[in-house]
Image (spheres, coloured by chain):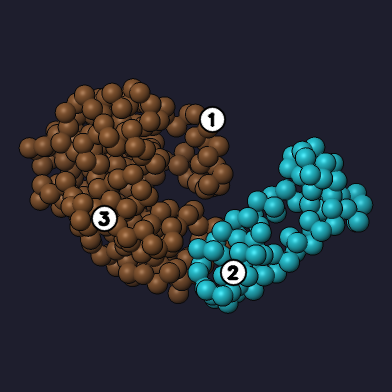
Chain colours: A cyan, B brown
Amino acid sequence: MAESILLLESRAADLRLVSAAARLVDVVCATQRCASASRRLGGRVAGSKPIYGPYMRLRYPNWAAKYLVDALLALTARVEAEL
Amino acid sequence: MARFILMAGYARSLPCVILAEALLSRGHEVSQIMLVSPLQIRRLRRILRQRGISWFFGRIRPRTASASELAGLTAEHAVASDSLRGLSRRRGIRILRVKSFESDRSIRAVGALGADAVIYCGGGILRRRFLAAAPPVLNAHAGPLPQIRGMNAAEWALLLEEPPEVTAHVINIGIDTGPVLLRRRYERTGLESVQQLRDRAVATGLRALLEVVDSGRWKGDEEHLIDTSARQCFVMAPVLIELVERRLSG
């Protein structure tokens, strides 16, 4: 959703939309688990919040981390353009 | 002489204390201060979700007026206390603690006191029931209206390249859509942090509200309702707050 908002914002620049995207990314970042005994699991993002909730119960889908990275890259590029 | 009710969102609301002292020194009456009780789980959760934990700790720490833009106003109006409790003790103003401004208790109180106007210093969005029962509610919005409606108005005005302006208006059912009473500009020069920017906007807002009170024209003109076509501003993301800091510093 954050990426979609940034895509919309790229057509009609408005920092209010960038703020909305950044706050969404912040919410997901707050749930990301960076520490892990296994390197394969570092940086994982749960499919549900709480993790036992509906949709992807007790799982860490690969696309959750992928979309987070995509959104972070798009957001970083947009904010850097303002500097 | 007019009779006012003040509304505050927390007990250490320095703007509310300054405003009360300024009104009293002008010979007005402050009938009551309505204070939303901060110790409510629902309210704390909403505030933390919107503004983060740093905002919460910033509110707990005692704020020194000497270090802020409000220092000039505290000296001007000989403000001796930094909390509403201290003000209440010194000046004998009753503080009414309510769970929310929507509660039956606050609606009964605001209607019963026969005040000429209510001045808003925080405490959440006012809904239809409260506004219907209350006399005109005056507010100083920290940004230019109608361009910047909503939260973090001073910061959004800077980021969106709008003029540094405070708008005194009458609160109505929309978000910052009520009739405009007065506009006042302030300078952004010499500011180094977002907190200083906010404080300068608050200080300008307080002066604007006192001008409105002095002029006695607080009923507002319904013909000058705010145009709501501009996108509303919400709580600014931390990354953009950093951007504001950078722009201020250089």
Viewer-closest of B134 and B42: B134
Characterize the local packing of mark 1: few (<14), some (14-19) or many (20 or more) Cα atoms within 10 angstroms: few
Query: Can residue B71 be seen from the camera position used here?
Result: no
Alpha carbon separation for disc pair 3 and 2: 30 Å
Q: Label 3 amino acid? A: Leu
For the N terminus of chain B, the quadrant is top left
Q: Is residue B219 rendered to the left or right of residue A24?
A: left
For the C terminus of chain B, the quadrant is bottom left
Percent position of residue B183, x then y: 23, 60
Percent position of residue B52, x then y: 55, 47
Q: Is residue B22 above or below residue B165?
A: above
- Numbered tag placed on residue B225 in the rendering: 3
Percent position of residue B221, x then y: 18, 52
Residue corresponding to mark 2: A8
What kind of element bears circle 3?
Answer: loop
Viewer-closest of B20 and B2: B2
Q: Chain of mark 3?
A: B
| Residue in view at x 38 percent, y 26 percent | B103
Q: Is residue B61 above or below residue B34?
A: below
Alpha carbon separation for disc pair 1 and 2: 36 Å
In contact (CB < 8 Å): disc 1 and disc 2? no
Query: Can residue B48 be seen from the camera position used here?
Result: yes
| Residue in view at x 69 percent, y 52 percent | A28
- Numbered tag placed on residue B41 in the rendering: 1
